[in-house]
Image (cartoon, helix red, strand yellow):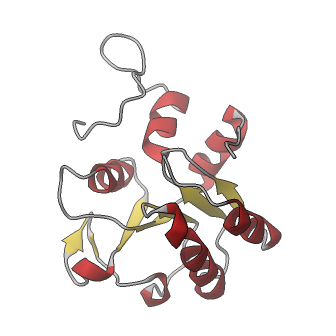
Amino acid sequence: MSETYSDAFLKEILTRTRVIAVVGVSPNPVRPSHYVGRYLALKGYRVIPVNPGHVGKSLFGGVVRGSLSEIDEPVDMVDIFRRSEAVPGIVDEALDVLPGLRTIWMQIGVEHAEAATKARAAACEVVMNRCPKIEYQRLFGELRMGGFNTGIVSSKL
């Protein structure tokens, strides 16, 4: 089911996006969802953390929400850090409660063709099985000290 995306397509999404709801974010700094959210916030994105198990905690300058329906501001992109089987419910909720949503982004290892088709039918662009942190580093010239991008997700910034 793996899809390919042009660099221009990914770069356009990352350039126009300003507000990202990260579903499945963890307050634990060693978890990938935490350091990806932190990285995106450090790059100037407004990151809205979403995790029902950590509601009310402060993360990346915002308060953790229990669900997408608790967000009362425009969101450009939903970044999904949940298992693939959870994606349809997240996409349905996002399409129902986030008017103006432009992108559904599924993290590395997360794919759901039917949910992607539904999102695209609602005029959302979809990226599956990719990490916005890795793509940002690759597309905007943030190379490692050795002069290359290792492609490894790291909590070290």
Residue located at (20% from left, 73% from top): 58
Quadrant of the drawing holding the C terminus = top left
Residue located at (26% from left, 83% from top): 55
**Percent position of residue 22, x then y:** 42, 65
Q: Nearer the viewer, residue 86 or 140?
A: 86
Q: How many marks?
A: 0
Relative to 110, 41 lies left or right: left
**Percent position of residue 63, x then y:** 27, 78
**Percent position of residue 152, x then y:** 36, 30
Task: Tell me if residue 114 comes above or below residue 127 in the rendering.
Answer: below
Task: Tell me if residue 131 comes above or below residue 22 in the rendering.
Answer: above
Relative to 32, 77 lies left or right: right
Within the image, what quadrant is residue 60 found in? bottom left
Return the residue found at the far right.
121
**Percent position of residue 83, x then y:** 46, 62
Return the residue found at the far top.
146
Within the image, what quadrant is residue 122 found in? bottom right
